[in-house]
Amino acid sequence: MMRAIFAGLLLLFQTNAPSNPASQAARQWRRQHERAIVDEFVSLLAIPNVSNDRANIQRNAELIAKMMEKRGITSKLVSLPGANPVVFGEIKTPGASRTVVFYAHYDGQPLDPKEWASPPFTPTLRDKPVEDNGQTIPLPGTGTPFNPEWRLYARGAADDKAPIIAILTAIDAIRSAGLKMKSNIKFAFEGEEEAGSTNLEKILTANKELFSGDVWLGCDGPVHQTRSQSITFGSRGISTVDITVYGPRGELHSGHYGNWAPNPAMMLVQLLASMKDANGRVLVDHFYDGIEPLSETEKRAIAEAPNIDAELMREFWIGSTENAPRKLAELITLPSLNIRGMASSRIGNQASNVIPATASVTIDMRLVPGMEVRETADRLIEHIRKQGFYVVDKEPNAEIRRAHPRVALVVRKGGESPHRISMDLPISQEVIRTVESARGPVVKIPNSGGTGPDVATRVLRIPEIGIPIGNHDNNQHSFNENLRLQNLWDGIELMAALLTM
Amino acid sequence: MMRAIFAGLLLLFQTNAPSNPASQAARQWRRQHERAIVDEFVSLLAIPNVSNDRANIQRNAELIAKMMEKRGITSKLVSLPGANPVVFGEIKTPGASRTVVFYAHYDGQPLDPKEWASPPFTPTLRDKPVEDNGQTIPLPGTGTPFNPEWRLYARGAADDKAPIIAILTAIDAIRSAGLKMKSNIKFAFEGEEEAGSTNLEKILTANKELFSGDVWLGCDGPVHQTRSQSITFGSRGISTVDITVYGPRGELHSGHYGNWAPNPAMMLVQLLASMKDANGRVLVDHFYDGIEPLSETEKRAIAEAPNIDAELMREFWIGSTENAPRKLAELITLPSLNIRGMASSRIGNQASNVIPATASVTIDMRLVPGMEVRETADRLIEHIRKQGFYVVDKEPNAEIRRAHPRVALVVRKGGESPHRISMDLPISQEVIRTVESARGPVVKIPNSGGTGPDVATRVLRIPEIGIPIGNHDNNQHSFNENLRLQNLWDGIELMAALLTM
């Protein structure tokens, strides 16, 4: 549906011939080799890639290394005991003073094959999305063009093996056209991103020299919902807490004690309602203190971003938004306080005639630069105290519960820091220019709303910029993950431009 | 624990020899026949009595009828197709112009035998409560007195076979002492109270003449927590609703959309928080309108009721109460609005980084005389509208959800009317005097906090008065249900007084 609806906006952003010579060469090469490109992609997608499937993870890594070697690229698997290997590759460019590191990951989300329309590791071409009753079709013969709206279904098709194939294909195209690179190029293709990048920081720390460079291009995630190319310069952080408030020791009969025994669900809703006003502004004292203001460039980028809010509201069946009339593109550069879930006793036909014993909630707060994980949780805890709660960090005993009218257990679940590099940095501006030379006007996102990695910045001290290629409707992390072929074609042209930057 | 703690209060209310001659005769008879009384009780408790176990329900009913016949009491089983029989019995008293109907029920709550310390239908004597490590002991030989603190464990021991045995034993004692009855006596022992008295109204309607009388004594439930005898003149009603509020069509990523997509859990907590103030007063307009005021007698009864609030707070581990400083005895004569449970997405380690799609709550409102089931739900629904919600009574479709900033599905789950008869009625005053002549000062409760039957009033147009005999700590409705023997002994004396009223 989104596909059809955005058709109008799409036209505004669709490119014709790219101005970038490497992108032009990539387009020509791709048109001549569509079947071979897809065959190579299929061979990679056919290897199961769930992080804890160590044997197949190894096969994936070895195949990618072999694909590099076939192209004369020095490669090796870099690992640590217990870790899935990072596939490292390097192209040295004589006379180059700059190194561009391309990051992607070859592992995929865990899955249940029963949910899939076709087996997740049997890459399957379909003429339309499964949701639109798309049918399986055979790969066309060599020389016959693929319809760019066809989709390839497999775990990892979009998230995140597509950039690996796009990069390798772009290298073929660059060489075939006799174009030269200007920078040294490195590849870091991770094998456990979907398991939380458990070992990436350790691997980079142990191999700082090997992975160092001047800019880290994170080739992951989907492009904008309008199909426009996007570039992301950071992401929100997160701080998560679990809160439980207490009523009677056990559930009490709501007739015998209702109107007298304190109801923990009522206490919790009064507490939570105090955290935000009716329009979505967070009422926790100092919550917005110290936030780094957006630069003029970032503000302009937000103003220029396509306004898809009305369409998303339609898609999501919602009749209002928080913090209206400010739009989504701006709001993700501000922090949020979100109820992930809450629970107290039972509801509906499972409900009993009781006053519950406890009521619990999980809250995540998305952070923007200038905010810290621990300090933000501290401010929330202080707010809970101001609402009259005695706050504990472990299960309160009878004495504590008897001694205080309101008791809240608050458990900090940790989080991740926000990060954002300036769009005004020379490298930021150069990446924007390069991407636009390949793909036309791009949507420039100061920071994504979600939380993303900044391990390169933390360990290697180099700026990270997000360069996605997948379609937004790729079913990432869910069943029936797929890549729209036009996104792969566009990705090859994009990578060709970035490789010759 | 409650047992030990209330020792002081208990002394105030403990009786010595009863002034009522029938009660005196009952005490003497009981002292001479303890083993025989317990044997008869054990024979009744040994028959499983879960409502849907039709074969055993029939055996229970037949045994009770046989116990009546053994005493020369006319009895019969009154039923309807598909219903468990009501055991009817009748003692006609020459010259009597008044008929007293004793109600009890012989069925018990469903159970899981695995939870019980001893098999629920193998009545087991213990020297102390199971919770205090009470041990199984054999029944003492005939002539050897039972320790009155011993307890008999079985489903139905307290709820509600004990009154049946107490009544039948009291009749033996009255006759043995050559005392005369002054009223006609009827018995209505129901067999599906724990299944919601599904057919009682129909059976009474079909047999109005048979069950008619001047007062209906509901012999069910526990006495006061202080062990004092209590009498109840009504009960609160109830009106229950389920509410669901809506966010996005499906759960959304809290990073990508947090701060923009409306969070249904936040909407729900704001709605619920608007329903009560910090001290527990309900803020729904007109909620308290039309409530029948308490009479001076009822107010005095509440003032005279033992104040157990501080002790209950200790027992329940609570540090505050709603509507403080008013005490529980008063508060159950006022209506309540209670959250039974609520749910939205998942919490704790099961929580995902999402904005939930829906949030739901189940609310019960306890009603007092002057309030109505439907009208009270109407007032709540009007309150929800005033908070900006578009209220629907079935699952809202996409168009409705898109058209309104806030949508709430409210499902009325029905309820029961409140009822309360005046303590100033001559029959009320006579019952109070009679009970006090057997048991000393009683706790007079205008209405119980819970919801109780008023079918006799509705169908037969006769006043109902609640006369419990079970210990408050009988584990009613749970596993390890038990009756403290002193409560059976007291019950026999109490029933002797009421039978000769």
Image (cartoon, coloured by chain):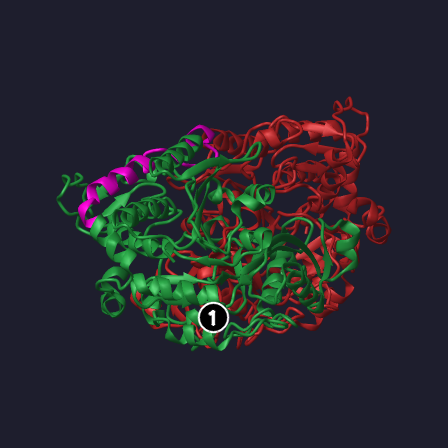
Chain colours: A red, B green
Compared across the picture, whether A178 is left or right of B110 comes to: right
- Give the quadrant of residue B355: bottom right
Compared across the picture, whether A213 is left or right of A498 comes to: left
Q: Is residue B39 highlighted in magenta?
A: yes
The reply to whether residue B464 is visible in this rendering is yes
Pointer 1 local density, CA inside 10 Å: few below 14, some 14–19, many at least 20? many
Please tell me which residue lies in front, A482 or A376: A376
Q: Quadrant of the N terminus of chain B?
A: bottom left
Q: Is residue B400 highlighted in magenta?
A: no
Q: Secondary structure at mark 1?
A: helix
Q: Position of residue A109 (x, y in %)?
A: 55, 39
Q: Position of residue B316 (x, y in %)?
A: 35, 63
The reply to whether residue A254 is visible in this rendering is no
Instruction: Give, as a three-letter code, the residue at label 1.
Output: Leu
Q: Position of residue A160 (x, y in %)?
A: 61, 41
Q: Position of residue B317 (x, y in %)?
A: 34, 64
Residue furthest toward the front?
Answer: B95
The residue drawn where x is 76% and y is 45% is A23
Please tell me which residue lies in front, A172 or B243: B243
Tell me which segment is drawn in magenta.
B30-56
> What chain letter is assigned to the residue under label 1?
B
The residue drawn where x is 62% and y is 47% is A220
Please give the count of numbered marks on the rendered protein.
1
Compared across the picture, whether B392 is left or right of A273 comes to: right
Q: Quadrant of the C terminus of chain B?
A: bottom left
Q: Which residue carries the number 1 mark?
A: B331
Please identify the dominant SS of the magenta region.
helix
Please tell me which residue lies in front, A416 or A35: A416
